Image: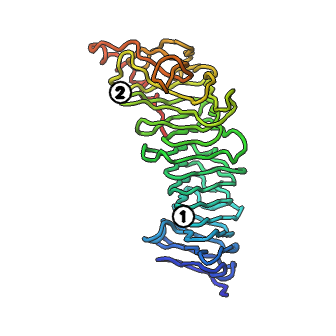
């Protein structure tokens, strides 16, 4: 067994025995365009505490700079990111077991692959950096993370368990586009409600599994740059803002589903004293019904929006208010299933007046400032 360092500067180095990198004294370097591939197809590998310095997306024919090719393998070394880096579990599972702190300020770590992986290492040193999840597999975080960049789940599942935290990440995107609607954030492993902190926004077309609470000055924004639905499979408590865009083609919607603490065992929706931020587009029709939130359980929505557009304008059942150039009414007893304004326990607005064509320009100028700050996206 050699005692020197290992440098992979191009192509792929396949590791098929746990001691293939020599002793753990000197460490291993993986450069841009290179890959360290762990292959436990012939038997699971437990690689020791070999320090790993890594950068890049890997060799041209690989999915990352550190890749798991097969077997249920573990790597105990502490990882240092020298730049934005992709780690992929393509088959089997890759368990990064070091409980230290990944070094790499202002770097983005991408977790990828069709298979699963776990990361016990803390991400607290990625201040200014971010975390991206791609590939159909599940990556599970079990330690803290004070990185201040975005958390973006493009595919598969990012699961939080133990002491895992993404509380300093201002933007959490779960499926940025409609084609990424299978993206999932799973917070059930935390054992309690996941709370969005002040300054955080949760957006996307995907799903959150587990209970969610949005604190004051946080936000939930279904959809993304396009209209869409964000699904929460668990009790949902909103004390921050709900950002919803309305258009002639469709409406952003928060869908609360799954099991919870409702009277029938399903999830509940609580919007008490939260803020409704509407972005009404052109072409909304008189008497048109636009659904903002729906729930699959039988319980009534708890509470009502306490503010509209940041102004102290409570929106109780049947309240009439102005949104952009439209006059609307709001109900908490709509039925998304039946597409009706009454007969259910969902939240919807109905257009009760539209501006005359000659007044649209004047009203548009008067509300331009409101519309500029109304839409907040991740």
Residue 328 visible in the picture: yes
Q: Is residue 325 left or right of residue 347?
A: left
Q: Are marks 2 and 1 in contact (CB under 8 Å)?
A: no
- Circle 1 sits in a helix, a strand or a loop, which is it? strand
Image spot of residue 23 (x, y percent): 69, 81
- Circle 2 sits in a helix, a strand or a loop, which is it? loop
Q: Which residue was labeled with disc 2? A: 248
Q: Which residue was labeled with disc 1? A: 88
Q: Is residue 125 left or right of residue 279?
A: right
Between 222 and 1, the one lying in front of the other is 222
Q: Is residue 34 above or below residue 172?
A: below
Q: Is residue 222 above or below residue 314?
A: below
> Quarter holding the N terminus?
bottom right
Instruction: Please tell me how crowded label 1 is: few (under 14), some (14-19), or many (20+) other residues with Cα within 10 Å.
Output: many
Between 76 and 341, the one lying in front of the other is 341
User: Disc 2 to disc 1, how far (Cα)?
Assistant: 41 Å
Question: At 52% across and 12% down in the image, what residue appears?
Answer: 318
Image spot of residue 78 (x, y percent): 66, 67
Between 201 and 256, the one lying in front of the other is 256
């Amino acid at each position: 067994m050699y005692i020197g360092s290992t440098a992979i500067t191009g192509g792929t180095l396949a590791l098929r025995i746990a001691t293939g990198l020599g002793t753990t004294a000197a460490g291993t370097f993986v450069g841009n365009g290179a890959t360290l591939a762990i292959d436990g197809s012939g038997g699971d590998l437990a690689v020791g505490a070999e320090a790993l310095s890594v950068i890049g997306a890997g060799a041209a024919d690989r999915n990352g700079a550190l890749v798991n090719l097969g077997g249920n393998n573990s790597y105990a070394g502490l990882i240092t990111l020298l730049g934005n880096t992709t780690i992929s579990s393509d088959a089997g599972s890759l368990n990064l077991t070091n409980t230290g702190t990944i070094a790499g300020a202002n770097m983005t770590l991408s977790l990828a692959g069709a298979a699963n992986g776990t990361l016990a290492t803390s991400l607290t040193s990625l201040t200014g950096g971010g975390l991206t999840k791609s590939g159909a597999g599940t990556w599970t975080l079990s330690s803290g993370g004070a990185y201040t960049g975005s958390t973006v789940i493009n595919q598969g599942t990012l699961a939080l368990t133990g002491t895992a935290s993404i509380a300093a990440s201002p933007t959490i995107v779960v499926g940025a586009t409609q084609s990424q609607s299978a993206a999932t954030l799973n917070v059930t492993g935390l054992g309690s409600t996941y709370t969005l902190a002040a300054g955080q926004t949760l957006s996307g077309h995907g799903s959150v599994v587990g209970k969610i609470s949005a604190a004051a000055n946080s936000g939930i924004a279904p959809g993304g740059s396009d209209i869409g639905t964000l699904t929460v499979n668990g009790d949902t408590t909103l004390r921050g803002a709900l950002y919803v865009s309305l258009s002639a083609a469709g409406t952003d919607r928060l869908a609360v589903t799954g099991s919870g603490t409702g009277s029938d065992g399903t999830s509940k929706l609580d919007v008490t004293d939260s803020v409704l931020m509407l972005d009404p587009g052109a072409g909304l029709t008189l008497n048109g019904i636009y659904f903002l939130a729906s729930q699959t359980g039988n319980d009534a929505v708890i509470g009502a929006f306490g503010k509209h557009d940041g102004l102290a304008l409570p929106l109780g059942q049947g309240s009439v208010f102005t949104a952009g150039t439209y006059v609307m009414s709001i109900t908490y007893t709509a039925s998304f299933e039946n597409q009706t304004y009454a007969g259910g326990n969902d939240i919807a607005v109905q257009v009760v007046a539209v501006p005359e064509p000659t007044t649209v320009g004047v009203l548009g100028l008067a509300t331009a400032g409101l519309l500029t700050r109304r839409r907040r996206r991740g």
